Structures are given as structure tokens and as C-alpha cells.
Image (tube, rainbow, N blue to C red):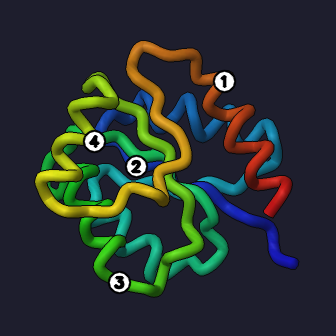
Amino acid sequence: MANQEVLIVDDDMVTRLILRKMFNAKEIVTHEAENGKQALDVLEKQSNISCVVLDLNMPVMDGYSFIEHLSTESLHEEVKIYIMSGNPQTSFKAKMNDRNVDINRVIDYYQKPFTMTDLVERINTVVQQS
């Protein structure tokens, strides 16, 4: 089985850098995107991505639209999504309900500020089990 990989989607370069270093320390291969559109492009090219760490508020294509797009296609059904956002989880759920989008692929929700170590450990566990 090929190594599984994580896609970090955030418009903040520092957040991507910190997460990349933490995942790489766990020997998890990372890919990065600054917005949802770039993330979709990465998913099309990289078949080993098993998890997406997703910010919600980004330019070009936000996290809400990214999830909505993924829910309308069947190519990436196995990809697990972890949200990191300054928005409360109830706000996220309400927006997704308004768009009639199933959020069952969202495994966990981390409201900023949060401890990145917790996020990386949780995803590391999921990746190792896959």
C-alpha cells in the first residue's frame, strides 16, 4: 500500500508551514493549496491523499464551496475532511444545511484558536489506520 498523504488548504502561509512541518515530523507526506480551487486541482493529480485539513474562509473558493463541490462528485468519496476555522461549528453546520450539503465526510472540527498538536495527532491516527 502506498503512503497516504494529507492536503493542507489554508490561505495563511504560516499555518500551512507549521502544519507541514508537524506532519512531516510524523513522516506524513503533505500537499498544500491556498484555496479550494487549488485544492481540487491537487486532488485531481494526487491519488494518495486520504485527508484534507481545510480552512473555511479563503479567497477564490472557500471551504464551504470546496465541500459542496466534493459532495457533488464521486471521485473523492474516501477523502476525510478536518475543518479548522474561526467560525463556530454551529455556523458551519447551518451554512452547509442552507446549501443542502451532506457534511458526513467532515471527521472533526477545530475552532481557532486550537492546539495544532491535537489536530496533527488525530489525523496521524486516522492515516495510520487507513
C-beta proximity under 8 Å, tags 4 and 1? no
Few, some or many residues within 10 Å of mark 1 (<14, 14–19, 20+): few
Q: Disc 1 to disc 2, how far (Cα)?
A: 18 Å
Few, some or many residues within 10 Å of mark 3 (<14, 14–19, 20+): few
Q: Tell me which amino acid carries mark 1.
A: Asp
Q: Nearer the viewer, residue 34 or 83?
A: 83
Mark in front: 1 vs 2: 1
Labels 1 and 2: the sequence-earlier one: 2
- Residue 93: give its label: 4
Q: Disc 4 to disc 2, how far (Cα)?
A: 19 Å
Q: Which residue is pictured at 29% across the width and 24% down the height?
A: 88
* The image quarter in which residue 87 lies: top left
- Residue 3: give its label: none
Q: Tell me which amino acid carries mark 2.
A: Val
Residue under pointer 3: 73
Residue under pointer 1: 118
In percent of width and height, residue 115 lies at: 57, 16
In percent of width and height, residue 46 lies at: 56, 77
> Seen in the image, is 56 located left or right of residue 121?
left
Residue under pointer 2: 9
C-beta proximity under 8 Å, tags 1 and 2? no
Q: Which residue is pictured at 42% across the width and 28% down the height?
A: 14
Labels 3 and 4: the sequence-earlier one: 3
C-beta proximity under 8 Å, tags 3 and 2? no
C-beta proximity under 8 Å, tags 1 and 3? no
Few, some or many residues within 10 Å of mark 2 (<14, 14–19, 20+): many
